């Protein structure tokens, strides 16, 4: 029982990342009808917003400390971050320590701008093109973005720790009546899960309770009729692209303490996120979110020793297996509307 | 869904995300290898001799490859008499005089292994056939090393391995044209075990997470054998896919398993992520199991990956082939040269490539010929010092260097970005030596074969 | 095929016409559907656009409404001195075209009231909610219900209400009676009478030609994408041979 709970917990944060990326993908596909293979790159750029902010906040003044030597025997250059000089070591240190959450504020405008540039610069020319063309061009864009990041940041993963306060894990097991150390879950992953839920609910609330959201929902359901009512839906859909980009970027920002960001992380998440979208039902927002969590948890279960010894390699293919089964038996996905994808 | 054209075919026609090159059989035609009157592949005829540096320039180990390239370029400069000479001043053999190799100026070409065996073979092949490279050096993975070593053996050139740690490279996959300076998994196990027993006691229960490919398996095998010999119990060994980025589902069972040591047979990105998950996510190092402090061991360290893991390496033990903090003269000379030219101390992959280039050049000088079989003879059984590792022997039976091994630990309070690791012990070479027909190295059927000069 | 043109028909004299459709050619992809259609509509007039199935009636309305399909390749459309032929559908709506589509197209996921409110997001706004619920009391009763759960007749009312919620110059009705029981058709007809009395210029496409003609002032008959008759509605009602040849009634 405890190992089941544990694997469910384990699947939640990765599932949350999948859900967020899939949500953005579905938003873009459902509004603009574009299959956006550069969405994983947006996740990566968000993560590197956190890296960038951490570097900026750690930007240091270099002073020579004659009493210490560096590796060549020259006097040691000591780096003191400017924020520590300005605000004192305590406040300054905390600012650097909290770079990842602070990066949320930084990432929102950056991601919206990046999304906007992507959409206006490249993707809008492909609205009417066949999906295969869209895939090729957005995939190419993803590779370019990846290489740009690699050029500036190198190929190594860059440690981006969470604030000190959140290091470590919480013993859920004890709370539920199990023995100690049977169900533990890191604090930051809990925070990530909560953050993801807030974002997801935010997007749904925005769509459900604002007028803008109502127009977008109407446009997703019946684009032609919305045009008949005088509404220029393209403009609104472009804004949704920015929203989807921001969601993916924020998912990336907060993920950095879990897996140190590297230039390749976008691709790692992209393919699986697409599988999530297909399983959840293309065009269904709740389907994307639900499928994201389900597949994250499923992947977690498939990685247990029991699973990998019974069916070696199952953890690498389980998600694809599920996708194949879904596509064969219920092609519209778990929550897709009837008729979609059923030709 | 809007009434747009949604056909399953249209959307599922997804572009393939990187189709790996198929392995192509390597066929060397006689004409291509240009065996002239001197009777071996790429015999240098003009005033230059070309070396081939095959390193990962793209892919996850690109930063290591970049460091290797820096060291290789430095070696070429020193061979040609430029710079401050580096280890030519400290090398025990005085055959090299800074006038190139056998009077020929050293030039080089570079290739990109992409850390994939097929790409590495293709790039090495191109350097040999098109650029006339007479020796191939570099690399960051054992899979690549074994592949390129095989190719060099077929082609008739010398392979001076870069960073490769699996036993197989000079074990069951050893080749006469191939030489490894870098230490191997067995040596890591042999060096680490006593230090581990000392620090952590003999009554420990270890849980292994192992990268699922040949290097991971050989390291796991070696560490398990050497720790069990000292009384540890191996609770569980779990293989993790090489492509994993999130290891939390592998780490969660650890605390439950009754193990009090986690051994991470991971390298590169795997190591950064698993260590981060373990230390930062699950805070394993502050836990107590069986009444003891939980410990983590990363048997193979690399400085660049240590940077990636940040403060998560504090207190974690591992082994290295070389570390810039070594106090011997060869090391100091190399660190000074490298540091003054590039502004940072060399990594251990840099040092092994630098050493290998110098060793090759020196062997050619002593043999008086570039012929691979002459080089092989000059290197076999060669004892030397002054390249940074202390006294070293290039054993004839398997072309493996035997030297002291470093046990290192993540520093608690690093003063700068470069002393994140501190040397705990320098294990004497006798302790890490094994017979050439050791079971982990292919047993009695492992053989070098004969050297191939090509032509 | 003879073309019967009423010399009193407005297009021949090319005097100013409120809505003028001039030699439009429209395609669904490579399918040539609207093959050179011209007619005029005067302010306040109700025009019945008739023809057999596949004659191109719906396509003509869709072209006037400036939807993407069918695409207008040549020809001109003028509404109250404004050129419409280069506009997109949302611009045409702002200029005063109100299309009530065939199959009603009530937006799923939105309530009745939200469907109407959707029409009032962009200027120019037309009828207010209270006035609409005055004309369609049943919609008022169901205002918080999800639009697609309404009966066929109620959905038709909602679709018309949505058009009226905008300040339109020309109302385009595409098969308003389709699929409705006769008693519901009566209700809708009553509503259309009210609309006619308000003086809203209207083009009505209907399979049920008689019902449309009884409402209309003039009629244009299409056959395979071209105009074959342009004259008064009364004339069509009275000319049995005409009706027989082009409308099969």
Image: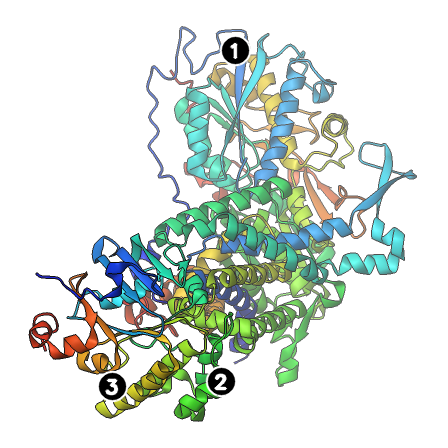
Q: Which residue is mark 3?
A: C180
Quick one: SS at disc 2?
A: helix
Q: Residue at x 36, y 59 (%)?
A: C78
Q: Secondary structure at mark 1?
A: loop
Check the image and report above or below for A71 versus C114: above
Q: Taking A225 as reference, is A79 left or right?
A: right
Horizontally, is A227 left or right of A325 in the view? right
Task: Tell me if residue B82 comes above or below residue B112 in the rendering.
Answer: above
Please identify, in this view, whether the residue under mark 1 or under mark 3 is nearer the observer: 3
Report the front residue among A281 and B18. Answer: A281
> Numbered disc 3: what chain?
C
Q: Is the same chain shared between marks 2 and 1?
A: no
- Which residue has dot 1 on it? B369
* Residue at 42% in and 57% down: A34
Q: Chain of mark 2?
A: C
The C terminus of chain B: image quadrant: top left
Give the labeled residue for mark 2: C129
Q: CA distance from mark 2 to mark 1?
A: 98 Å
Where residue C182 appears, as percent x and y from the top left, is 22, 90
């Amino acid at each position: 029982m405890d190992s089941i709970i544990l694997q469910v917990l384990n699947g939640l944060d990765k599932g949350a990342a999948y859900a967020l990326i899939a949500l953005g993908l579905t938003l873009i596909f459902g509004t603009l009808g574009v299959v956006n293979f550069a969405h994983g790159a947006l996740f990566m750029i968000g993560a590197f917003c956190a890296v960038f902010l951490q570097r900026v906040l750690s930007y240091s003044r270099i002073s020579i400390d004659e009493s210490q030597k560096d590796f060549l025997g020259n006097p040691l250059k000591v780096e003191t971050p400017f924020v520590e000089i300005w605000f004192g070591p305590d406040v300054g240190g905390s600012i650097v320590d909290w770079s990842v959450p602070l990066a949320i504020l930084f990432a929102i405008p950056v991601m919206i701008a990046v999304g906007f540039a992507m959409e206006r610069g490249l993707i809008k020319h492909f609205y009417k093109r066949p999906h295969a063309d869209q895939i090729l061009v957005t995939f190419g864009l993803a590779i370019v973005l990846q290489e740009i990041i690699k050029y500036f940041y190198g190929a190594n993963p860059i440690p981006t720790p969470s604030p000190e306060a959140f290091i470590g894990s919480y013993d859920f097991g004890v709370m539920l009546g199990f023995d100690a150390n049977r169900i533990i879950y890191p604090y930051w992953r809990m925070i990530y899960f909560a953050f993801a839920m807030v974002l997801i609910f935010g997007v749904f609330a925005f769509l459900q309770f604002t007028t803008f959201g109502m127009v977008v929902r109407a446009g997703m359901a019946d684009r032609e009729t919305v045009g008949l009512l005088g509404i220029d839906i393209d403009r609104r859909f472009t804004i949704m692209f920015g929203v989807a980009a921001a969601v993916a970027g924020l998912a990336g920002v907060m993920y950095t303490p879990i897996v140190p960001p590297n230039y390749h992380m976008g691709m790692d998440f992209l393919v699986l996120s697409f599988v999530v979208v297909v399983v959840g039902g293309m065009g269904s927002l709740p389907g994307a979110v639900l499928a994201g969590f389900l597949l994250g948890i499923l992947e977690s279960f498939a990685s247990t020793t029991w699973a990998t010894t019974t069916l070696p390699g199952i953890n690498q293919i389980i998600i694809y297996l599920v996708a194949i089964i879904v596509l064969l038996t219920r092609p519209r996905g778990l929550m897709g509307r009837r008729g979609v994808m059923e030709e | 869904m809007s009434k747009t054209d949604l056909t399953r075919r249209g959307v599922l026609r997804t572009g393939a995300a990187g189709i790996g090159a198929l392995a192509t059989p390597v066929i060397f035609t006689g004409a291509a290898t240009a065996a002239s009157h001197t009777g071996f592949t790429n015999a240098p005829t003009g005033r230059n001799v070309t070396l081939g540096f095959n390193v990962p320039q793209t892919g996850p180990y690109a930063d290591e490859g970049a460091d290797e390239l820096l060291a290789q370029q430095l070696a070429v400069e020193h061979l040609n008499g430029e710079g401050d000479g580096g280890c030519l001043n400290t090398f025990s053999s005085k055959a090299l005089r800074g006038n190139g190799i056998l009077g020929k100026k050293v030039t080089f070409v570079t290739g990109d292994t992409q850390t994939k065996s097929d790409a590495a073979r293709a790039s090495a092949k191109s350097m040999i056939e098109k650029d006339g490279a007479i020796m191939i050096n570099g690399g960051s993975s054992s899979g690549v090393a074994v592949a390129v070593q095989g190719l060099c053996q077929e082609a008739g050139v010398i392979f001076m391995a870069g960073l490769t740690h699996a036993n197989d490279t000079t074990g069951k996959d050893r080749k006469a044209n191939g030489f490894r300076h870098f230490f191997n998994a067995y040596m890591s196990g042999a060096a680490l075990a006593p230090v581990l027993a000392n620090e952590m006691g003999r009554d420990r229960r270890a849980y292994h997470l192992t990268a699922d490919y040949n290097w991971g398996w050989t390291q796991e095998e070696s560490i398990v054998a050497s720790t069990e010999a000292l009384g540890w119990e191996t609770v569980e060994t779990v293989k993790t896919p090489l492509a994993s980025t999130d290891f939390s589902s592998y780490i969660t069972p650890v605390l439950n398993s009754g193990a009090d040591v986690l051994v991470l047979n991971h390298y590169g990105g795997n190591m950064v992520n698993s260590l981060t998950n373990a230390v930062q996510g699950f805070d394993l190092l502050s836990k107590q199991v069986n009444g003891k402090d939980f410990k983590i061991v990363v048997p193979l360290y690399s400085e660049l990956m240590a940077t990636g893991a940040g403060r998560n390496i504090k207190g974690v033990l591992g082994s290295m082939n070389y570390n810039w903090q070594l106090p011997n003269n060869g090391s100091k000379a190399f660190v000074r040269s490298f540091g003054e030219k590039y502004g940072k101390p060399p990594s251990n992959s840099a040092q092994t490539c630098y050493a290998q280039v110098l060793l090759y050049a020196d062997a050619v000088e002593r043999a008086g010929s570039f012929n691979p079989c002459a080089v092989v003879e000059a290197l076999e059984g060669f004892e030397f010092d002054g390249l940074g590792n202390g006294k070293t022997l290039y054993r004839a039976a398997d072309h493996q260097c035997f030297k002291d091994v470093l046990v290192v630990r993540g520093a608690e309070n690093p003063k700068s970005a470069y002393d994140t690791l501190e040397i705990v012990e320098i294990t004497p070479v006798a302790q890490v030596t094994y017979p050439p027909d050791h079971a982990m190295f292919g047993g009695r059927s492992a053989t070098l074969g004969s050297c191939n000069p090509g032509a | 095929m003879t073309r019967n043109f009423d010399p009193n028909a407005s297009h021949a004299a090319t005097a100013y016409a409120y809505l003028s459709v001039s030699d439009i050619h429209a395609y669904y992809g490579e399918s040539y559907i609207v093959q050179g259609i011209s007619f005029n509509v005067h302010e306040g007039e109700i025009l019945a656009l008739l023809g057999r199935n596949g004659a191109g009636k719906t396509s003509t309305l869709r072209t006037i409404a400036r939807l993407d399909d069918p695409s207008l390749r040549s020809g001109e459309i003028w509404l109250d001195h404004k050129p419409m032929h280069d506009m997109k559908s949302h611009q045409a709506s702002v200029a005063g075209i109100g299309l009530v589509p065939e199959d009603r197209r009530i937006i799923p996921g939105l309530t009745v009231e939200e469907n109407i409110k959707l029409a009032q997001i962009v200027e120019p706004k037309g009828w207010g909610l209270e006035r609409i619920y005055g004309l369609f009391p049943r919609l008022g009763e169901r205002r918080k219900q999800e639009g697609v759960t309404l009966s066929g007749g109620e959905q038709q009312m909602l679709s018309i209400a949505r058009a009226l919620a905008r300040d339109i110059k020309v109302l385009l009705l595409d098969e308003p009676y389709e699929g409705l029981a006769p008693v519901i058709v009566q209700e809708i007809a009553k509503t259309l009478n009210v609309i006619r009395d308000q003086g809203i210029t209207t083009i009505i496409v209907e399979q049920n030609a008689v019902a449309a003609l009884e409402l209309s002032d003039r009629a244009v008959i299409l056959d395979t994408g071209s105009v074959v008759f342009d004259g008064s509605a009364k004339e069509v009602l009275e000319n049995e041979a005409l009706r027989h040849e082009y409308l099969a009634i």
